[in-house]
Image (cartoon, rainbow, N blue to C red):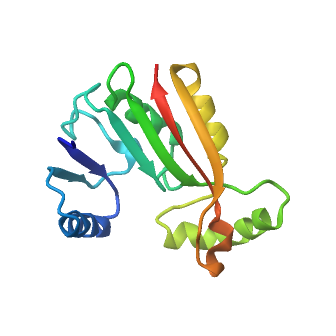
Amino acid sequence: SIERYVAVEPNSYFEEKMREEKDVRGLHFPLEFVGLKGEDVDNNIVSVDNGSFDVVILTHVLCSVDSVEDVLANAEKALKPSGGRIIFMEHVSAKEGTFTWYVQKVAAPILNIVGNGCTFRNLRDVIGNYLGSRFDTQMVDFEAPVPVFMYFARPHVMGVATKR
């Protein structure tokens, strides 16, 4: 069971939505909402004890941060020393030279404005390289079901990284 849920999200709009969804689903665990970007989390300020979490979940987060590596470092610090998991799902840049990749290049400036700083990145490599030998990482590429006008956001990666 969930003993504590700490949501780190810079967009305050999502706090109300998260609380509503929690109530609709009848979930009864403490929800702490922290209005920061992931790389700005100081675990002492957010009252997160280093090494105290079983799981860190990242969904459509790494596209809009200034430093993916800083977010992953903060996630790693929050996890228990052995066996802690990072579960992630992110949209990613399409394979270079494909039609979707070109559309992403055209859409990127608009998405950056309307998507709270969202940008297309090769997160497969960034995640794998950063977590390296400290984690067992499994990733799967997939095409997300998105509205036709958001076709360029279909390329996704999801996975689990387990701390060794």
Q: Position of residue 138 (x, y in %)?
A: 58, 35
Quadrant of res 107: bottom right
Which quarter of the rendering shows the N terminus?
top left
Count of numbered circles on the image: 0
Figure check: 19 above or below 161: below
Figure check: 134 above or below 142: above
Q: Residue at x 56, y 31 (%)?
A: 137
Figure check: 144 above or below 151: above
Q: Position of residue 85 (x, y in %)?
A: 41, 33
Q: Residue at x 25, y 46 (%)?
A: 6
Q: Position of residue 145 (x, y in %)?
A: 59, 69
Judged left or right of residue 27, residue 57 is right
Q: Which residue is most to the right? A: 97
Judged left or right of residue 39, residue 110 is right
Figure check: 63 above or below 11: above
Q: Residue at x 46, y 65 (%)?
A: 116
Judged left or right of residue 80, residue 141 is right
Residue 123 or residue 146, whichever sits in front: 146
Judged left or right of residue 21, residue 158 is right
Q: Which residue is most to the bottom? A: 149
Residue 93 or residue 112, whichever sits in front: 93
Residue 84 or residue 35, whichever sits in front: 84
Q: Residue at x 32, y 51 (%)?
A: 36
